[in-house]
């Protein structure tokens, strides 16, 4: 007959049919007669044991409850010498058995050492030392010569000139702004935006830098406004419809227009690379700009955090055009960055003038 408690591993093997029929019968019989193991079986989450839980739920009501053995289970549990499996079984039983729980509490109280009142001895020792010192001082002969003070030989004075550290002047109260501007001055150039480089790949024609009549905007740039104005070339008797996409998802549409510009009435997604196109219908013909093989018209709106930082910099008392030029460049706003750098140089900012000179062709 089985005497050892079952483990979670045994229950798992039983659930998945990995025990022999004889071992499975032995385990099931043990579960139906052992309160701790039945409790462990009820707590096992394996769905394959669902057919046993109904019968396991009644264990402890129809059979006589078994209490833990003090010598082989309770005492080793209290002094921490039980193995992990045996400890789990004991704790499972204690969850359901008030009598064994009280036994454990008594054992804990019995093995806990009584507080030692050593403070009385400490107080007595301190008092004794105090009295002893007082007696020694009282019996000290008054004729004893006092201990002469130590002779202090003065070193010859030397004149030294201490150089006080020169504090580093800062332009801005925000340490991040100070770091950004210092990096630009050290590198001799404004920071470059990787996102702007991605947008401008193959987008020169769309930006209108060539002689093409189909220049549209925005294309290949980063913009700050969440509702930028879209422009495209005019077609005779044309009706226009603008479509804006975030990947494959359409995020805005203008509807039929007769003019060659449009501003959305709702904010477009920030921090996302968007593409757009305009469909032109006239005389029962439909034209799309840009059309292959021209690259798609891509643009990006600065993120919410970048927009907040730019707004804060424009409103800060210690802000200047050089800081704005650096922050615009970090966000990918190239045109605004160049304008701010020229203004800073025109106002006599030497660092901005050096950066501007380095950027001239």
Image (cartoon, rainbow, N blue to C red):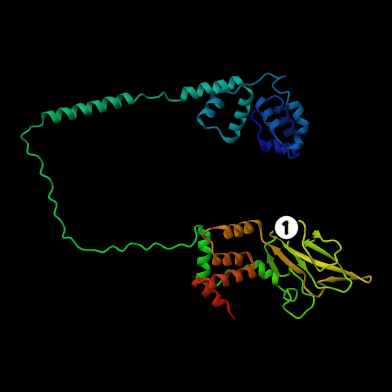
Q: Residue 62: image x %, image y %?
A: 72, 19
Examine the image and state in which quarter residue 52 appears: top right
Count how many numbered circles sit on residues in the image: 1
Which of the two residues, 12 or 232, is positioned nearer the viewer here? 232
For residue 57, which quarter of the picture? top right
Q: In this view, which residue lies farthest toward the left?
A: 143
Residue closest to the far front: 347
Going 77% across and 57% down the picture, which residue do you hit? 265
Check the image and report above or below for 209 versus 239. below
Q: What element carries label 1?
A: loop
Q: Position of residue 58 (x, y in %)?
A: 73, 23
Residue at 61% across, 65% down:
328
Mark 1, residue position: 269
Q: In which quarter of the image is residue 128?
A: top left
Task: Name the quadrant of the C terminus.
Answer: bottom right
Q: Residue at x 75, y 29 (%)?
A: 53
Residue at the extreme right of the image, as rendered: 284
């Amino acid at each position: 007959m089985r005497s050892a408690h079952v483990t979670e591993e045994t229950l798992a093997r039983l659930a998945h049919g990995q025990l022999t029929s004889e071992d499975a019968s032995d385990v099931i019989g043990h579960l139906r007669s052992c309160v701790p193991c039945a409790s462990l079986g009820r707590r096992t989450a394996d769905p394959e044991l669902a057919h046993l839980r109904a019968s396991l739920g009644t264990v402890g009501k129809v059979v006589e409850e078994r209490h833990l053995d003090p010598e082989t289970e309770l005492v080793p549990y209290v002094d921490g010498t039980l193995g992990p499996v045996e400890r789990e079984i004991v704790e499972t039983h204690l969850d359901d058995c008030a009598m064994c729980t009280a036994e454990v509490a008594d054992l804990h109280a019995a093995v806990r050492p009584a507080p030692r009142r050593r403070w009385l001895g400490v107080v007595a020792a301190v008092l004794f030392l105090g009295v002893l010192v007082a007696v020694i001082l009282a019996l000290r002969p008054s004729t004893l010569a006092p201990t002469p003070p130590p002779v202090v030989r003065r070193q010859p004075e030397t004149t030294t000139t201490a150089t006080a550290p020169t504090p580093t002047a800062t332009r801005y109260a925000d340490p991040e702004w100070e770091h950004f501007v210092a990096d630009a001055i050290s590198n001799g150039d404004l920071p470059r935006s990787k996102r702007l480089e991605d947008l401008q790949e193959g987008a020169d024609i769309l930006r209108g830098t060539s002689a093409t009549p189909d220049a549209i905007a925005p294309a290949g740039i980063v913009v700050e406004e969440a509702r930028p104005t879209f422009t495209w070339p005019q077609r005779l008797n044309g009706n226009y419809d603008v479509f804006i996409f975030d990947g494959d998802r359409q995020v805005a549409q203008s509807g039929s227009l007769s003019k060659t510009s449009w501003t959305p009435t709702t904010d477009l997604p920030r921090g996302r690379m968007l593409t757009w196109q305009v469909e032109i219908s006239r005389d029962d013909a439909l034209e799309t700009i840009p059309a292959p093989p021209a690259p798609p018209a891509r643009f990006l709106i600065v993120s919410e955090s970048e927009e907040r930082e730019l707004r804060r910099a424009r409103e800060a008392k210690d802000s200047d055009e050089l800081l704005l030029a650096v922050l615009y460049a970090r966000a990918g706003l190239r045109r605004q960055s160049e304008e701010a750098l020229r203004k800073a140089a025109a106002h006599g900012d030497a660092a901005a003038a050096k950066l501007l000179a380095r950027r001239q062709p």
